[in-house]
Image (tube, rainbow, N blue to C red):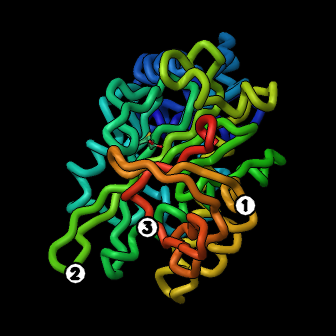
Amino acid sequence: MKEGILKLLKENNDDFLSGEKISEYFNVSRAAIWKHINTLKEEGYEIESVPRKGYRLISSPDILTYGEIEKYLNTEFIGRKIYYFDTIDSTNKKAKEIALEEVEGTIVISEEQTLGRGRLGRGWVSPKGKGIWMSIILKPQIDPMKVAKITQIGAAAVSLALEDLDIKSYIKWPNDIVINRKKVCGILTEMSCELNMINYVIMGIGINVNLDKQDFRGEIENVGTSLKVETGKKISRKKLLGLFLNRFEELYTSFINKDNFEDTLKICRDKSILIGKEVRIIKGRDEKSGKVVGINDEGELLVDYGENKVENIMSGEVSVRGLYGYV
Ligand code: BTN
């Protein structure tokens, strides 16, 4: 009912809506309405209450509930069902628990993660209300070998969504988004499959939106950054989330239904921060240096180690670093 009251207040624009009218609408007492209004206020909604006039919505918080992102969404199935948490250990973990029963496109999102997970067993700093920490449940009927491409679709979609907000970013193959040589977004894709049948894919995305410099401590101090730190402006998380989901659905459906990976490839190549750079390729304890010469049609990184020895590198198996640092 709380969501219903909020909807009524939003539809009523800037006008007052009397407690009596709302209670008649939902057929409950005015005290019950008052309780829900108070909960909404605790969530960050600014609601003015004036005796004999009623309630008026002044402003809505930048939270990532369905009610708040709905107006930015023009997707058919991505993000149409959202599990929203104030706090959780990891959205990827939760998404895996519910994936088999859920429809494709369902999202798990949390304002904070206490045990956020990154690639290669690392952690992921996810402070409350400052980022977009979410996992999308996907059920693509494709060869499991092609799942790495979905992660690249995710990276391309993040970069396009940032462009929609006039923020220029680069893609560090396969799936980091970089601004001023520091990471603002990472993607952790996990999959469950049998033989060549995919049960589900969980694409976990962390976007550092409004984190402050002090949020990047220890080993991430010189590697991580946020949109706010780089642009000097606070960014609307709900708008960015909506833009991303729209961009993602477009590229993803085109890939699944029309086998179109070219659009994603073009974005990943155009925005690549690695092409033309000398890098270190780290595979466990093994480290080699070479020059990135491109990304092939399969989305693999092409690295030239000299003497015409070009290797195709698949994502997932390596870490790529600049010669002197992250990139
Ligand atoms: C990386 O190491 O670059 C990947 C980071 C992925 C972080 C996101 S935040 C939401 C989702 N839940 C997690 O526990 N991890 C991913």
Question: For numbered disc 1, what is the local secondary structure?
Answer: loop
Q: Residue furthest left?
A: 194
Q: Residue at x 51, y 21 (%)?
A: 43
Q: Does residue 60 appear to the left or right of 1 in the view shown?
A: right
Q: Residue at x 53, y 64 (%)?
A: 152
The circle on residue 181 is none
Can you say which quadrant of the picture contains the N terminus?
Answer: top left
| Whether residue 92 can be seen here | yes
Q: Residue at x 53, y 89 (%)?
A: 258
* Residue type highlighted by circle 3: Met
* Residue type highlighted by circle 1: Gly
Q: Quadrant of residue 100?
A: bottom left
Can you say which quadrant of the picture contains the C terminus?
Answer: top right
Residue that carries the numbered disc 3 in the rendered image: 314
Q: Nearer the viewer, mark 2 or mark 1?
A: 1
Q: Nearer the viewer, mark 2 or mark 3?
A: 3
* Residue type highlighted by circle 2: Asn
Taking the image in four quarters, ligand 1 sits in the one at top left
Q: Nearer the viewer, residue 305 or 211?
A: 305
Distance in Å between CA atoms under marks 2 and 1: 36 Å
Q: Quadrant of residue 59?
A: top right
Query: Where is residue 191 drawn, in percent x and y?
Result: 28, 61
Graded by Cα atoms within 10 Å as few (under 14), some (14 to 19) or many (20 or more), the crowding at tag 2 reads few
Residue 303 vs 109, above or below: the answer is: below
The circle on residue 276 is 1
Q: Nearer the viewer, residue 145 or 51?
A: 145
The circle on residue 196 is 2
